[in-house]
Image (cartoon, helix red, strand yellow):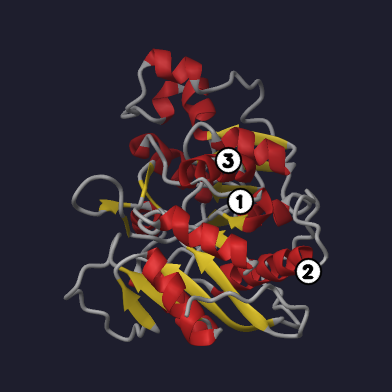
Amino acid sequence: MLFKRLLSTSPKCIGFAFDIDGVLLRGKNPIARAGKALRLLTEAKVPFVLLTNGGGTLEAQRTKFISDALKVDISPLQIIQAHTPYKTMISRYSKILAVGSPAVRGVAEKYGFKDVVHTNDIVRYNKDIAPFSGLSQEQLIANSRDIPGLDKSKFDAVLVFNDPRDWAADLQVVTDLLISEGGLLNTLRREKSATPAVPIYFSCNDLLWANPYQLNRFGQGAFRLLIKTLYSQMNDGLPLNDHILGKPTKLTYDFAHHVLIDWQQKMVNSQVDSDQQILPEIGIEPTFTPFDKVFMVGDNPASDIIGAQNYGWNSCLVRTGVYRDGDHLANVEPTMIVDDVYEGVVSVLNKYS
């Protein structure tokens, strides 16, 4: 019999976290029965969040698109994008280099960062910095700002929000800052060190991701691999000390756990229309959870499933994205392997209701 109970105010319940690309959507197209799965949980009042290594837009924009595509209401407070934890860093860093699609500048400014510079701005400032940039003059003018005094104040951090669009330029600009004199553009430090001149954060480390093409594509993890290799080459073989967020890191799973707990409490208190959310600092573990079990539903064994496994959550590995039958899972042990997200949701609810 299909799961029918309503959300309880008892201490324990079931929760879900869903990856997006390869689980709910393939590119911009809904995956069959994905909307049906989320509508089932909504009707049954089972709390869930979306936990993705994607990004590049504001949470409200992303959830509106997904809500329209899947025909289910999803709150901006129910999504954790790869860069959502950057919201907690606004008091830590002032001038940042925002790396990713042109839209990430607006995301960073909306989060509250005071001085946001995009890599395109630096190319516009001096094209000789990135001689192999793939941007045309028209694209550069449309996607950059003329910022006076770019080289007069130091950068505090490099934040990679999503997969860069102009890799040749971004590799050069990011590496320049990492080996600069204290984060000052147009400078080169003398000493060699594993610690970069400014801290760098990668919002995820996915080497591959699934888009509408039949074969998986390189993701931000590939960009990180190149940055680390170049940095090491410029620092006598020393490895780059960087910071990684996103699945499968414990930092992101802790953050998502807080968000899921907050959403469950909003459901219990009939506050799902609220736009207020208390975000934890990165690295803070929840001191209490109302959940007996949380199921991570994902398509990527190397991020979704191993992350859930290491964190102590259960998992549903779907066949609609990165994973293919016969793929070597090594030490990854999903709780179940299912054809799609709907099969996973129904199986969990029938088994644990």
Instruction: Relative to 120, say whether 18 is above or below.
Output: below
Residue marked by disc 3: 64
Instruction: Relative to 235, say whether 268 is above or below.
Output: below
Contact (Cβ within 8 Å) of mark 1 with mark 3: no
Image position of 223 (left or right of 174): left
Image position of 27 (left or right of 58): left
Amino acid type, residue under disc 2 in the picture: Val
Residue marked by disc 1: 74
Image position of 309 (left or right of 215): right
Amino acid type, residue under disc 1 in the picture: Ile
Tell me where residue 64 appears, x and y as whole percent.
Answer: 58, 40
Q: Residue furthest front?
A: 1
Tell me where residue 95 appears, x and y as whole percent.
Answer: 69, 41
Instruction: Relative to 53, say whether 252 is above or below.
Output: below
**Mark 2 to mark 1 CA distance (whole Å):** 16 Å
Q: Would residue 51 be seen by someone viewing this image from the given angle?
A: no
Give the quadrant of residue 96.
top right
Tell me where residue 326 appears, x and y as whole percent.
Answer: 16, 76
Image position of 208 (left or right of 85): left
Residue marked by disc 2: 268
Q: Residue at x 58, y 67 (%)?
A: 252
**Mark 3 to mark 2 CA distance (whole Å):** 23 Å
What is the crowding at mark 2: few (fewer than 14 residues within 10 Å), some, or many (at least 20)? some
Q: Mark 3: which secondary structure?
A: helix
